[in-house]
């Protein structure tokens, strides 16, 4: 099928894009890489008489070290992230999650901001943003805001963004010494959305105790979420030496124990997803601990 007719707008600045979205109201939709929006338009699951393309908007693409962390422009493609040695070194969790998104052709068009704004429950980037406590920068006719990732993903394909608000960039904390990162997911085929997955970011203190731990879950609820009970359980515990299999399994068990809205569908029951999710948390936890401990 083909999308219904739309007018195409190609603003070149954030101000122009924001004022177009405000002026056209609910008749308009921003389009970034189109990797989620275009299939929905083509299948006529949704229709907008106006599309506001973000690809030519200046200042929302690329990445650079800024005060408060590594800034990644919302319109930066996933493949640009994947190719960047700087991202691999400074924001390893983002780098490691990227190859798990669809296929190369999809990542070549799909953007960081598009994935976060689309907020698919099974997508990798929202869980990464949660695990890292990333900060999301936005622009709207009311000015700019910075929102913590915590609380941003509010439900199935819904976020804290207002209708007329654009995501302009994301600030990720930069990796330091004694930090460890891992993302693990189970998908039926390479390139498919995950059935269940986990992104883990930890920092150890000089005595090898957990000083900070963020665990983002995906595929395990209506939206990406943090495994807060597991984060609390590991806070301050000694993991120097890499931690045991039994300890990792316990983190996985606690990580999914409190989940109460796990989807059941063709790909798996809620019970199955929880089992897989616990295994993904455990694996990611153990890898992150080993990296942070220097093992
Ligand atoms: C076959 C296939 C497999 C895929 N597999 C995966 C996968 O495994 N994991 C995964 O995470 N994703 C997957 N995707 C989705 C892909 O990552 C998309 O790129 C991503 O979800 C959306 O990014 P986009 O830039 O293409 O956004 P678009 O499709 O252009 O937009 C998506 C939504 O976000 C909004 N939006 C985009 N940018 C902004 C912005 N800056 N500010 C405000 N709103 C904005 C749009 O208005 C729209 O509502 C897959 C897609 C396909 C087609």
Image (cartoon, helix red, strand yellow):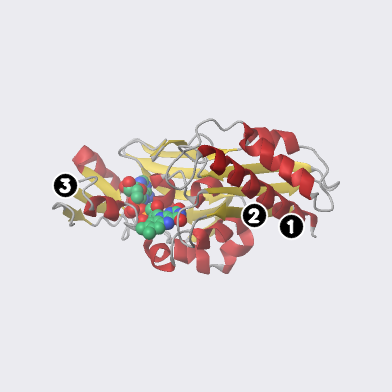
Residue 204 versus residue 229 in the image, above or below? below
The reply to whether the C-beta atoms of the residues labelled 1 and 2 are less than 8 Å apart is: yes
Please name which of the two marks, 2 or 3, marks the residue nearer to the observer.
Answer: 2
Q: Kindly identify which residue carries mark 3.
A: 49
Q: Residues within 10 Å of mark 2 (few under 14, many from 20)?
A: many
Asked if residue 197 shows in the view, the reply is yes
Does mark 3's beta carbon lie closer than 8 Å to ligand 1?
no
Q: Kindly identify which residue carries mark 1.
A: 291
Secondary element at tag 2: strand
Q: CA distance from mark 2 to mark 3?
A: 42 Å
On the image, the x and y values in percent for residue 264 come to 46, 39
Quadrant, the N terminus: bottom left
Please name whichever residue, 177 or 238, is drawn nearer the observer in this view of the structure: 238
Q: Earlier in the sequence, mark 2 or mark 3?
A: 3
Answer with left or right where residue 242 lies relative to residue 24.
Answer: right
Please name whichever residue, 95 or 141, is drawn nearer the observer in this view of the structure: 95
Q: Earlier in the sequence, mark 1 or mark 2?
A: 2
Q: Residues within 10 Å of mark 3 (few under 14, many from 20)?
A: some
Q: Kindly identify which residue carries mark 2.
A: 182
On the image, the x and y values in percent for residue 90 come to 62, 59
Quadrant location of residue 23?
top left
Which residue is painted at 46% across and 53% down in the image? 193
Secondary element at tag 1: helix
């Amino acid at each position: 099928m083909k999308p219904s007719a739309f007018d195409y707008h190609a603003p070149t600045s954030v101000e122009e894009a924001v004022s177009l979205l405000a002026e056209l109201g609910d008749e308009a939709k921003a389009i970034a890489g189109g990797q989620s929006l275009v299939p929905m338009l083509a299948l006529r699951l949704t229709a907008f008489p106006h599309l506001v393309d973000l690809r030519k908007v200046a200042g929302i693409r690329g990445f650079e070290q800024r005060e408060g962390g590594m800034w990644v422009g919302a319109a930066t493609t996933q493949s640009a992230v994947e190719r960047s040695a700087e991202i691999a070194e400074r924001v390893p969790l983002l780098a490691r999650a990227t190859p798990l998104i669809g296929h190369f052709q999809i990542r070549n068009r799909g953007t960081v901001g598009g994935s976060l704004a689309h907020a698919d429950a099974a997508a990798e980037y929202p869980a990464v943003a949660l695990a890292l406590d990333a900060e999301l920068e936005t622009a709207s006719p009311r000015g700019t805001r910075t929102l913590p990732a915590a609380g941003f993903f509010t439900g199935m394909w819904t976020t804290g963004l207002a209708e007329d608000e654009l995501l302009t960039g994301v600030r990720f904390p930069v990796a330091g010494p004694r930090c460890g990162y891992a993302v693990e997911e189970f998908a039926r085929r390479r390139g498919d959305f995950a059935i269940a997955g986990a992104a883990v970011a930890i920092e150890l203190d000089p005595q090898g105790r957990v000083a900070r731990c963020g665990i983002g879950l995906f595929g395990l609820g209506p939206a990406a979420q943090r495994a807060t009970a597991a984060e609390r359980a590991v806070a301050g515990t000694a993991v120097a030496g890499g931690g045991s299999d039994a300890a990792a399994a316990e983190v996985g068990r606690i990580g999914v124990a409190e989940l109460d809205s796990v989807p059941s569908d063709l790909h798996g029951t809620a019970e199955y997803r929880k089992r897989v999710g616990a295994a993904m948390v455990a694996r990611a936890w153990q890898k992150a601990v080993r990296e942070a401990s220097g093992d």
